Amino acid sequence: MADEFAKMGESLRAKTGKGLDEWVATARSTGIAGHMALVNHLKTEHGLGHGYANMIVHAANASSSLSQDDDALVDAAFDGAKAHWRPLYDRLVALVRGFGGDVGLAPKKGYVSLRRKKQFALLMPSTKDRFDIGLALKGEEPVGRLELAGSWNAMVSHRIRINAGEEPGGAVADWLRAAYDRAG
């Protein structure tokens, strides 16, 4: 994730002539406290796209996964009451890495995004009683445990809920593989 952040920062300088540090100073000097209010200000007043504006605000607030160590984010997601989900997460990551050497992990606060050329899945210990697997399977009909994601997460079209005490089953591996294949 740090590499993606660095590349985006280089692109920001090439596009605007100002580096991330300069944009962070600009953002902080506005005195605008709300995240989206500041994003919208940067877009409106400085002509930035949403991605750049959002990155600047996160950096200004040091509030995102962009400013944290990937291992620390994963550890935090599986801390406390959700710690019992870590072995399932580890098994799923090993499974997906077995699909090919191009799988990237992008930890966020509370979940881990699985990427190839684009995100194809996310692994999320939602509660102490439920683990969710989000899948990018647009157009796929829900069947069995595979359900439409609805408003759960806009980055995926489907999800599979795994309740405490349940095993994911072979269908989960099949759906993860299907999402992986589509992302290539």
Image: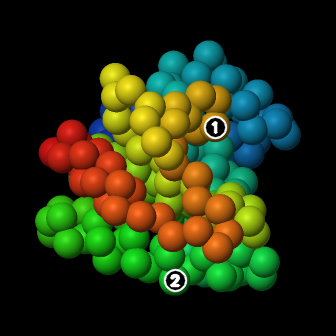
Query: Residue 152, labelled with which disc?
Result: 1
In the rendered image, residue 6, in percent from the top left (x then y), is placed at: 37, 58
Query: Residue 29, labelled with which disc?
Result: none
In the rendered image, residue 11, in percent from the top left (x then y), is placed at: 32, 43
x 74%, y 65%: residue:
129
Colour style of the rendered protein structure? rainbow
Left or right of 169 on screen, residue 103: left
Q: Eyeballing the image, is 42 above or below 58?
A: above
x 52%, y 31%: residue:
148
In the rendered image, residue 55, in percent from the top left (x then y), is placed at: 54, 45
Nearest the eye: 53 or 176: 176
- The secondary structure type at the circle numbered 1 is loop
Q: Eyeballing the image, is 50 above or below 45?
A: below
In terms of image quadrants, where is residue 63? Answer: bottom right
x 56%, y 74%: residue:
74
Q: Can residue 6 be seen?
A: no
